[in-house]
Amino acid sequence: MKKINYFLAIILLFSGLSLKANEGMWIPMLLRQNFAEMQRLGLKLTPQQIYSVNHSSLKDAIAGLSNSPHPQGFFCTSEIVSDKGLLFTNHHCGFDAVQKHSSVKHDYLKDGFWAMSYAEELPNKNMTASVLVRMADVSDSIIPMLSDTMNESQRSAVAGKIISRLKKENSEKGKYNVVIKPFFNGNKYYMLVYIVYKDVRLVGAPPSSIGKFGGDTDNWMWPRQTGDFTVFRIYTAPDGSPATYSKDNVPLKPKHFLPISLNGVKKNDFAMIWGFPGSTNRYMTAPELQFRMAHYFPPLVKAFGKKLEVWKKHMNANQSVRIKYASNYAMIANSWKYFIGQMRGVKKQHVLEKKQAFDDQFNQWANANPTRKAIYGDVVKDIADVYTKQGNVIEPLIYASVTGLSGAEIMKFAQAYAGLEGMMKQYKKTKDKNIKTKKLKKIQQMAKGMQEGLDKKYKDYDMATDRDVFAAMTKMYMEKTPAGLHPEYLDKMMKKFKNNYTAFADYVFEKSHFSSIAKAKAFLSDPDLKTLEKDPAFILSQEFMAKMQQASMAYRNTGGSLEKAKRLFMQGIMKMQPNKVFYPDANSTLRYSYGKVEGYDPQDGVHDYYQTHLYGVMQKEDSTNPEFIVPKKLKELYETKDYGPYGENGKMDVCFLTNNDITGGNSGSPVINGKGELLGLAFDGNWEAMSGDIAYIPKLQRTIVVDIRYVLFIIDKYAGDHRLIDELQLDKAMPQPIRVEDATQQPATSL
């Protein structure tokens, strides 16, 4: 009976005829695949209004956020909302930028930040916003050049040369950033041509008590009442071209920006989301999922959980430490909870069993025909064999990486001196005086450059916090890795300190030249090889690096033909289901999804409504818990019902749900109605569907959205930054009369 149930579940999940309208992160260039269905659900735009290469269209208002001038992927999505280059994205997407501008004196994380003029908008070094110019299928330029007789290294080398040529041909001498990526596990290749804007300035951010209301407790949860938004602006050179920061730069004049709807949402309203989803694994086999559940997620949860615990203790005790570690804490906490949720979701939704049933179906199809059997018959087995081997070596590698070299910050500081050590060793061996003089000059130049970068490196560092992290991470390293991965120096020191990790941490931070910026500056003012080689943090960082490389080598040696097997598995699936329209896994390229506004039933007897309101903020208020503190002014606005044009019927809507398909990277994505107007910003998924990156769950999977009217209410009524409101194109439907009287039938009025 179980086998029949699982088989039916897989048919429902993978059949082309039953693909749910809201499932899939689709390629913009192939918009017509789903256009008729989108029209049926409420889309009013034409395909050309949504995606066009030759004319302005909706896709020109979507920007990927990165910290690179030549990004291959994006950490978040944003959207252009005015003819002056104003950008909306999530609060957690802008959190790092806000943190970098914050100090104890100007605590923008706690108090918020609002620029009341262009002059007050703050530049963000290295932050970029990329807008897609066009995309193209370049598979025919690459795939025919690849042979089944090639091994994976040969395929990669041949494909790499072609990709390099195509990038150069399409960049127009550096005008565009060209990205070419494999899709469908290497069965297709698409080229994406972006224009990259390099001057992105912070314009506004609510206090964390609004932008992060609910904190880690509410993260991935519904109902939510979080004002998760930040405002940036793109600047260009006076001629409109991308340029790095300059006081002479001007606000961008975009090809398209999103108008904003003040009409709110109702159940079953059409919703379309555009953005840069990071990574999904919908076509994963059961052996890979089993590997992740048993060997990959658990060590990450343990290691991240311990680091967060130590950070939190120090952050709660010291305001300065809270500001310094806020961004890194938020990032790791989000991943930590995601891993926990994914393990829970896979188990509760029986995803592993469903994957196994599909693998069995694939094997039956592959082995039913001699030709197919020769190509696909051993694919699932080959994948399983690799993951069985990797399961034996991945956990030591994770612990060696996360708790060793990437554990305490002092390890990363110390590792940065490896290059300097190499130069000083060469200098010591050199006999020729002229060459020796030149090498000394290079050492001095390198030391000077490193010294100039120390302020930035140590800006968000606290020695007492890092010392406790070092003790906790080193203890976990020794307990969770086999003896063969223990650094010799660490074994020696543990005997000396009788396994007292706190005492060992005190010793390292007292003796090391890298435990404070003052000591690092002193060392770099007169670097000495013997001093460096005796530094306990440097010794340990070098041995940690060696052991991590050892663990990495063991892991890489298990890889075998995994890439080929996955490529053939995907190829086989598409042949097995020739009538199905497939969407590729997310890979941080521009995608769209579509669906509708809709609540859900998380468990028996419980229905979660699709909308939350400001009174929910007041219900959750807890002045003793920093995650649920409500600002005084927000309470005053609530008590007076001073919502302006953003409220409705005496209520202020805050968040709503759609059944759109999104994942990480979609944070900040615009949620757009059928007329192409902005309804809100996507910022989270829901706890019950945390396995969604592996298998879409139609009845449970929801996107959590901050209502654009709440965003504008905070900007206007809370922050008083009216100039931003004046930039926007707002649409508010006029109220219609309940009934219309026929004037010709009205009795005459006596004078």
Image (cartoon, rainbow, N blue to C red):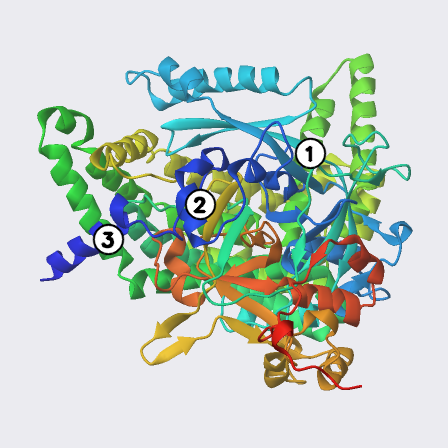
Residue 53 appears in view? yes
Residue wearing tag 1: 196
The one of 506 and 674 positioned closer to us in this rendering: 674
**Side of 295 relative to 332 (left or right):** left
The tag earlier along the polypeptide, 2 or 3, is 3
**Side of 529 relative to 526 (left or right):** left
Residue wearing tag 2: 25
User: Measured along the vertical axis of the image, is residue 346 above or below residue 573?
Assistant: below
Q: Name the kind of residue labelled 3 in the image.
A: Leu
Q: Say which residue appears at 35% left-offset and 45% top-offset.
A: 393
Residue 87: x percent and y percent? 71, 49
Q: Say which residue appears at 63% left-offset and 75% top-offset.
A: 627
The tag earlier along the polypeptide, 2 or 1, is 2
Q: SS of the residue at dot 1?
A: strand
Q: SS of the residue at dot 3?
A: helix
**Side of 542 relative to 623 (left or right):** left
User: Measured along the vertical axis of the image, is residue 329 above or below residue 235?
Assistant: below
Q: CA distance from mark 2 to mark 3?
A: 18 Å
Marks 2 and 1: which is nearer the front? 2
